[in-house]
Amino acid sequence: DLVQKSSDADRVSNAVNWKEECPIPTDEDFNQESLSSKINRNGDSTIGQQLSGIGIDLERIDGKRGRRIQRKVLTEREQKELGRLEAVGISKGEEVMLRFSLKESVYKAMHPILCEYVGFQEAEITPLPNGTAYVVLNLVSQSHIRPGIVVRTASWRQINGFFLTSSSVGLLGSD
């Protein structure tokens, strides 16, 4: 099963010309001193903007679909945590859809920086009743560690039968 998932990921990865769509950052791009001097010398923050991202996702609140996709999109730990939002009227199946939507927004925010496939098991999301979420990245490639990519914000709202989620990512130590 793991071999099949790996080959599926390879097919997706090979179907996209990553180098054309996403330039691969070099070590120089992630050197904070170099980054600061480039921004100051150029007088703008174009480079800094290239090393941050915002992601948005919208998913229909559908508990039945959530129960169907639960094992595919949630880690074991996330599955054990389900039910913590029942006090605010969100069923376990609906919470799966919320976590799925939050993961999608995080992946969309990370894509301009990493430009690589990220599987559902590579991030753990804990939505909180106040509309924010706690995110832990566990990328198999560990590519988020070298540049110090961090999830700055992750939030959610219920709007007219949908979960609207958003997230922002950037480099550790940058504004």
Image (spheres, rainbow, N blue to C red):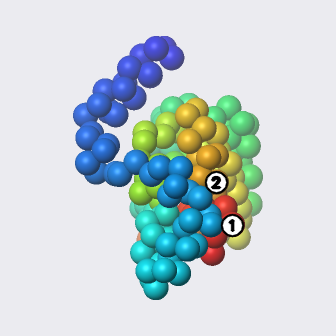
Residue drawn 49% across and 37% down? 119
Alpha carbon separation for disc pair 2 and 1? 8 Å
73 left or right of 90 in image: left
Residue drawn 66% across and 61% down? 172
Task: Give the mark nearest the N terminus, 2 or 1.
Answer: 2
Give the quarter of the image for residue 19: top left
Residue drawn 62% across and 46% down? 146
Residue type, numbered disc 2: Gly
29 left or right of 144 in image: left
Q: Are marks 2 and 1 in contact (CB under 8 Å)?
A: yes
Report whether residue 129 is seen.
yes
The residue carrying pointer 1 sits among few (fewer than 14), some (14 to 19) or many (20 or more) residues within 10 Å by Cα, namely: few
- Quarter occupied by the C terminus: bottom right
Determine the secondary structure under disc 1. loop
Mark 1 — residue?
Answer: 173
- Residue 145, given in percent of the width and then of the height, sits at 64, 46
Image mark for residue 137 = none
- Residue 96, given in percent of the width and then of the height, sits at 57, 46
The residue carrying pointer 2 sits among few (fewer than 14), some (14 to 19) or many (20 or more) residues within 10 Å by Cα, namely: few
Say which of 86 and 135 sits in front.
135
118 left or right of 138 in image: left
Mark 2 — residue?
Answer: 148
Residue at the far bottom: name it: 43
